[in-house]
Amino acid sequence: MDRPLSRRGLLKGSVLFVAGAAVSACGGDPLAKTKTSPAAGNAKITLNHWYHEYGEEGTQQAALRYAADFTKANPDIAVKVSWIPGDYGTKWTAAVLTSDGPDVYEVNDVSPDMVKAEQVTPLDDVLGAEKSDFDAKVLAPYTWGGKVYAVPMVVDPMLVFYRTSLFQKAGVAVPTTFAEFAAAARTLTAGKQKGLFVGNDGIGDLGMLVPWSNGNLLVEDREIVYDDPKVVEALTALKGLHDSKVTLQGYSTDWWDPGALITGAAAMQWVGMWAVPGMTAELGDDFGAFPLPAFGPGGRQVVNMGGWVQVVNGKSAHLEAAKKYVRWLWVENTAAQTDWNLGYGFHIPPRTSAANAADKLRTGQAQKVMEAANTHGVKQPALWTPEVRQPYDDAVTAIVKKDADPAKTLAEAAKRSQDILDKVPTL
Amino acid sequence: MTTAAPARPRAGGPHRAPARWASRWPAWRAFLLLTLPMVAGLLLFKYVAIGWGLLLSFNDARGTISLGSWNGLDNYRRLLGDPAFTRSLVTILVFTLFIVPVTFALALGLAVLVNRLRGGRAIFRTTFFIPTAVSYVVGALVWKMSLFSGTPSGVANSLAYLLGYEDTIGWVATVDPPLYWIVLVTVRLWLQTGLYMILFLAGIQQIPAQLYEAARVDGAHTEWQLFRHITWPMLRNTSVAVTLLLIINAFQAFDEFYNILASNLSGLGSADGRTPLIYLFQTALGEQNYGAGSAGAFIVTALIVVFTLLQGRFAGFGRTGEEEGR
């Protein structure tokens, strides 16, 4: 029994160990929590469906439940749901390059490059007759060459939330112009409390939103239009806001988390409607919301309409099944859509009829946000891609934080953005 | 191992190989068995990937990594023509020129001091070395969210308050003056100095004590003289290796920049503190422009190679003592 381990034995053992480790390592991303719907016993086809990791409790179980329900209704199609934690953007971009990519996945934007590379496929037949029940404004950025490439799953309006009690204490009214907005931020800055939180860099999305509120969407179709006095005016005002040191910077959470507003580190915060349940739980009714005020006369109020959309991988081996699944889940199944948007967190169901029927959206702050979104919602233009906007974002930092000459800096950046935009394929 | 074993005579059989090869076969077999997986892995996952990347860098590869859409030097031209990329190269050059000598001096200084300790050497050595075991991500987040948080309760802001500065400072967000560099530089120093200190310490402990004795006999009285004429020259190989590693690490800076500066859901922070790797990360994985991403990787590689060769030329890495004497 006490035989010492022979050299050959050791070698064999280690080779087996290494082989075993290699085999088990090949079994897929150990981080991804993958589950196949339980009813998948005798299915002929298995669809891969990817979600990013939604923060709300219960969303993963809901996603699995929808998949199982679908398989119950369509016994020959099983759905494998993958819940992707961490940097979802880089993971799906890498996965769709291979043949093992997901059949159905979610994204924020659909670019012409994605269309050209067949990472997405037209979904007009999936939307079908219900297409008119989706907000045209929301569908527009996903439409290329007359074809719609995505089905919205979640609509997330973003606007300014504020603490009503702090407004009352300081005697501040809801601002109606950018100047009033900046003045409110100054008044509300006292001691350890800052007036406004828009992002840890102190600018956040305001670099884009303030020009929007002054009537310039920065890009119009295939033309860069931000080399414009209106944008100069907006950014100069933004610089004033930044220089007055009333914005919260370097907080432990970023703008998408209502933490700063809840703890009182900031009195106003740019955040999405998803934060409403968290704020209600912590603050009761001590909060309100308003769109980013119109910059001045001729401007417009702004609610930024974000959200996730479902796309079908054009290279999927089971294109028809994937389309059937997407139509079943995100178009026909309004119950699932309402559950997904309002059962766990707080988003607007993309189908107008479903949104209008939702009781949760017809009370309190939620109703006000809904109204603001319907009247003042702006959807980011489709061609404002990360690549196109980079020169602009750099220009904004230079102007707001480093005293660069606005007109000159914007003109240079616009030339660059236009160059990049010209290389985007036309569809 | 078995290399020295006498050749085992093989009776007949299909082996026609010369006797020497046959005698060495067991050794060869072991060698192949042990190194093949490693070499195969290296070839497959490194060199094939590098070669593919090189080819890809001459292709218009948007949203795909397959070759076929040859566009010559377009990707390289696009990158070098983009002020954001050239600025990122300048950023990383300045960062390298600063961080390499500072880390070097700190690590060497600590090593000399720790080496001179009479007692408690192990404690200090461990204390300085422990940060090396901390991941860059964890270090970056501690720096960003606790030490240099922009709230009044942040450690740096509390200190500033004690020193009479009442305004809260957004350390990471302030680019004029560039306070964010304080955050970036201190976290890297904290994380990497320990490792290089250990390398220097090992080097110092290799120096024979007789040399110091001989130097004292020859009239070197001060510590400085001993350091200058014994420790420093004897550490030359260590110094060169440390500099080399430091330069490569500095050029590849990504983790702490990414974790400290990236603040938007879309995009990766602003132009300030954007290193080439962050730029390329965005190009390749954010915008799916794999051609330009690969081209950028080769530009950065070329820079690293040039710097390494230059420092090798000046410091004389790999030169033998004999060559040195000439």
Image: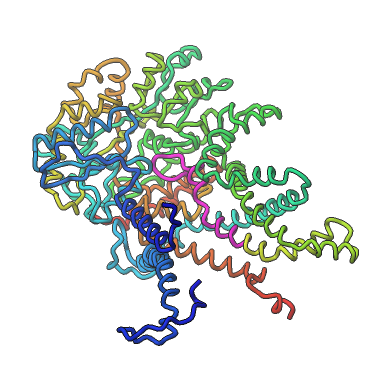
Residue at x 25% of width, y 24% of height: A343
Residue at x 43% of width, y 35% of height: A206
Q: Where is residue B269 in the image (x, y as percent from the top left)?
A: 47, 44
Seen as rendered, the residue at the extreme front is: A1
Quadrant of the rendered image containing residue B214:
bottom right
Q: Position of residue B245 (x, y in %)?
A: 58, 59
Of the pair A40 and A304, the residue shown nearer to us: A40
Residue at x 19% of width, y 30% of height: A337
Q: Where is residue B69 in the image (x, y as percent from the top left)?
A: 28, 67
Residue B74 seen: no
Quadrant of the rendered image containing residue A377:
top left
The quarter in which the C terminus of chain A is drawn is bottom left
Residue B67 seen: yes
Identify the colour scheme used.
rainbow
Of the pair B180 and A56, the residue shown nearer to us: A56
Residue B201 sits above or below residue B142 on the image: below
Q: Does the magenta stretch include residue B72?
A: no
Q: Is residue B245 magenta?
A: yes
Q: Give the left or right position of residue A345, taking residue A65 as reference.
A: right
Residue B13 sits above or below residue B186 on the image: below
Magenta stretch in the rendered image: B243-269
Residue B307 sits above or below residue A396 on the image: below
Q: How many labels does the image show?
A: 0
Q: Where is residue B154 in the image (x, y as percent from the top left)?
A: 59, 30
Q: Give the left or right position of residue B136, taking residue A107 as reference.
A: right
Q: Give the left or right position of residue A359, taking residue B181 as reference.
A: left
Q: Give the left or right position of residue A366, taking residue B161 as reference.
A: left
